Each structure stands twice: as structure tokens, then as C-alpha cells.
Image: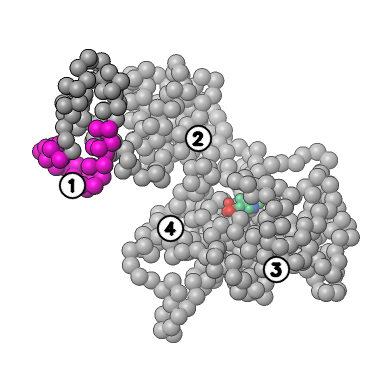
Amino acid sequence: MSRITPVADTQNEYRKLPSVDVFLRRAEVAALLVEFGLEQVADALRGLLDESRAAIQKGEGAPDQTLLMAWLTDRLQQSSQPSLRGIINATGVIIHTNLGRAPLSTAARRAIQSAATGYNNLEYDIDAGERGSRHTHARELLRQLTGAEDALVVNNNAGAVFLVLSALCAGKEVIISRGELVEIGGGFRIPDVLRQSGAKLVEVGTTNRTHPRDFADAIRGETGALMRVHASNFQQIGFVTKPSLAELVQIAQKVEWPGPPPVIDDLGSGTLLDTAPFGLSPEPTVQQSIAAGADIVTFSGDKLLGGPQAGLVVGKAELIDKIRRHPLTRALRVDKLTLAGMEATLQAYRRGRAVAEIPVWQMIAANPESLRARAESWRDRLAGAGLTAEVIPGQSTVGGGSLPGETLPTYLLALSIPHPDASAARLRQAQLPVIGRIQQERLLFDPRTVLPEQEEALIAAIIAEAGQV
Ligand SMILES: *Cc1c(COP(=O)(O)O)cnc(C)c1O
């Protein structure tokens, strides 16, 4: 609220405030009543009148009716903004966990809309005309794409890891290298998850070096699994070694009594496509893990897969079956919207169209020259509005706990502006908030992560902001 000039006659100022009933009958309030409903409008008005009375008590004047009307409209509009809303990601971080991770493909969005719109066969077997299982839906596609015998989709990968350990390893020992007792982020720490699941952690090796024999020596009758956790968000360099997945499988196979323990591979991001052709270091693929003999592989739906939030569990049929029957599966189950989006996303891989259709892969594959052209077109649009910006080379990252330290060459729109922090803060207040980067007193915008349909809004926001300075 802006300040009103102090006045002496407090009683008179109180009298200038309208009653709620009278104000609500004003002609210009009618539209607000239609848009927000009587209760919300009356509540907001009462709040404003209370605040006005408090201000009068401090010696300020009463707002006139026009001002009150403007405040009321403002307050109602602000309070009706959804808390979760769209933003423009100009950071150049493709899988940004704070910004909703993977944007979905057109096909996935359509599938979700269609699943949301009517009834569906979520748990209904159309051929048999009887109850079916939601777990059938993405199963066949995941089997085909990964080479695994069976598959299960749950709420997220953290849930998937917890479920797998609970179902297969409760009361047993799980052997992990000390170099893989990692924290993923958001408080997800492998040792804690293991404990929570009822499994007993057996650490082997050292932070930097773990040998196959460290695993072999730790195996006992109580061993529930050998586990590998992908170092999603950090790199170890230097005097470093650890057994390959194939070596772990070999060690497990040698256990005659009570039989080979399962080898569990938490891939984290997990990808179905090789990252190397895009100039990135190779991220292990799900197919490779299955081919190397992992019994269970877990990975995220919304990291490099580029689909909705989900945890995917693929592997040996017998184990997946055991996991599916565990009570936690019910607690971690996914809804129809996730399944619809997941199936459509996996279909794109099946058709060989992932890079063409899935936004995460489109962004990874975007070539620097096309990014330069987009940044230059933004620069020219700003020039048309009398603003000077530059196009400079820079780096984008994949993010989202995959490919740590890896970058993709890009071109950035760079805006030199007096107080970049304050400008960035105001850009976050735009109709469609803009999140960019600040570097050396410049605001930077990376076209790689800006969806083409958001370009107009981005340029308008920058012009509005820079025009004010
Ligand atoms: C990201 C990640 C997880 C958690 O996956 P969510 O889908 O975010 O729950 C677990 N393990 C590893 C190695 C990861 O990188």
C-alpha cells in the first residue's frame, strides 16, 4: 500500500471508509464478483479496510474509493495466481531440478490431456472385460527398449531405490563401495535410504579405490545384494578405480550357496540414448546395464529420459514380480497422467524419434550455430527497441544429476545493465518469470533452454525491464 498523507482528524478519516456492503454494491465491483466470487472479494475488502483503519490510527489518511478499488483488484489478482506456474528457463541448464526438470514432448502432453479428460482402462482389461493392472501399461515398451525381462513404473527413482531395497534386501546385507555412498540432493542419501529399507549397509573399499575382491571378500550368507550407485552429480579424478558392473555380476555368479545375490544398479538419470554423439562423455545406458547382467536397474523418468516424474525399475522377471507384490508398490504407484506421459515418451524412443521429439534431447542436440542465430535474432529485436546487447559464446549444462562437469558450447545474449541483481529480480516478477544467469555484471540468457514459443514473452520482458533502467 502506498502511504497516504498524514492528517490530524482521525475520526473524520475513519468515517470516510466505506462499509463492506455498500462498497460491494458499486458497479465496478460487479466484474470482480463474477471473477473471484463474493466470499473472496468480501474477505479481501475486509482485510484492506482493517489495514486502512490501522493506518489511520497511525495518523495516515483514508484511501479514497478509487484507490481502494485498485488495491482490491490487485490483491485479488495476486491471491488467485497459482503457486505452481510456468517460467522461462534461460539458464542453459537443461534438466533443472528447481525448474521442473524435463519439459514434456507434444505427444506426452497430448496423451496426458487425453488421459485426464475422460475415463480410461487404467486398471481394466478391455479384452477380458474385467479388472486389469495399471502395471501393464508401460511394461512392454520398457522391455523392448531396455532388453530387460520385466519392468515396473513407480513415483520417482528415490522411491524406486527404496522399494527395491525394501522388497529384496530387508534384513539382509547390501554391499556398496565407499566411493558410492552418495547424497543425490534433497536429502536423499544412499546410506540413509538403505537403513530405512531395513537392509544392512556393508561398505567396502575406500573413497577413491574399490577392487572386485573387496566385494568378493564381503559376500556371506546374509548378503542381500551387491549394489552400484551411479555418481550422478560429482566426478572423481586421479587415483581412482572401482569394479565394472560386469565384474560385480561375475562375482555374484560365483556364489554357490545360497545362490548368486542380485546385482542392483541405480543409474540415477539413466539414458536410453548414447550421449557421446552429442559431444558429451558417455553416460551409462540402461541397455548396457541390462546387457552386463544387472538383475535390477533403477532410473528416473524425468532426467535424461525426458518424460514425466517417475522411477523406472527394470530387470529379472522373478525379482520384479517380488517387488511388484511388495506393499510399498501400492504406496509408490503412479497415476494415469504419469503413465500416459511415460508411454508417449517411450513411444518416441521406439519410433527412433527421441532426438527429434523429446525436448531434453532437442536441447542437447541443438547445434551452436542455430543457437547463435536465435541469440542474434533476440539481439536484433532488442536493438529495434533501442537496447544494446551482445551475443557471446558460453556453455550450457545438462544438469539434473547427470553428466557432472560436462558442458555444451552455446551462444548467450548478454545484457550489460547497471544493477544486474535488481534487474534479475524484476525479471522474475514478469508475467512469465524469466530466470537467467548473472556473470561479471551482465545478465545472460541462453537460447538452448528457452522454448521457441516463449521467445516473444522473453523479449517483451527484457525490453520492459531494460527500458525502465
Ligand atoms: C536423481 C537420482 C536419484 C533420485 O531420482 P529421483 O527421480 O529424483 O527420485 C537416485 N539415484 C541417483 C543415482 C540419482 O542420480
Relative to 263, does residue 381 appear above or below in the rendering? above
| Residue 1 drawn at (x, y percent) | 30, 26
Residue behind mark 4: 108
The residues bearing labels 4 and 1 have C-alpha atoms spaced at a distance of: 35 Å
| Residue 364 drawn at (x, y percent) | 54, 44
Kindly tell me whether mark 4's CB lies below 8 Å from ligand 1.
no
Q: Nearer the viewer, mark 4 or mark 3?
A: 3
| Residue 218 drawn at (x, y percent) | 86, 60
Residue behind mark 2: 91
Q: Tag 4: residue type?
A: Ala
Q: Secondary structure at mark 2?
A: loop
The residues bearing labels 2 and 1 have C-alpha atoms spaced at a distance of: 39 Å
The residues bearing labels 4 and 2 have C-alpha atoms spaced at a distance of: 24 Å
Residue behind mark 1: 34
Q: Is residue 140 magenta?
A: no
Mark 2 is surrounded, within 10 Å at the Cα level, by few (under 14), some (14 to 19) or many (20 or more) other residues, namely many
Relative to 50, does residue 344 appear above or below in the rendering? below
Q: Compare marks 2 and 1 and give the one earlier in the sequence.
A: 1
Q: Tag 1: residue type?
A: Val
Give the main secondary structure of the magenta stretch.
Answer: helix
**Which residue is nearer to you in this view: 384 or 123?**
123
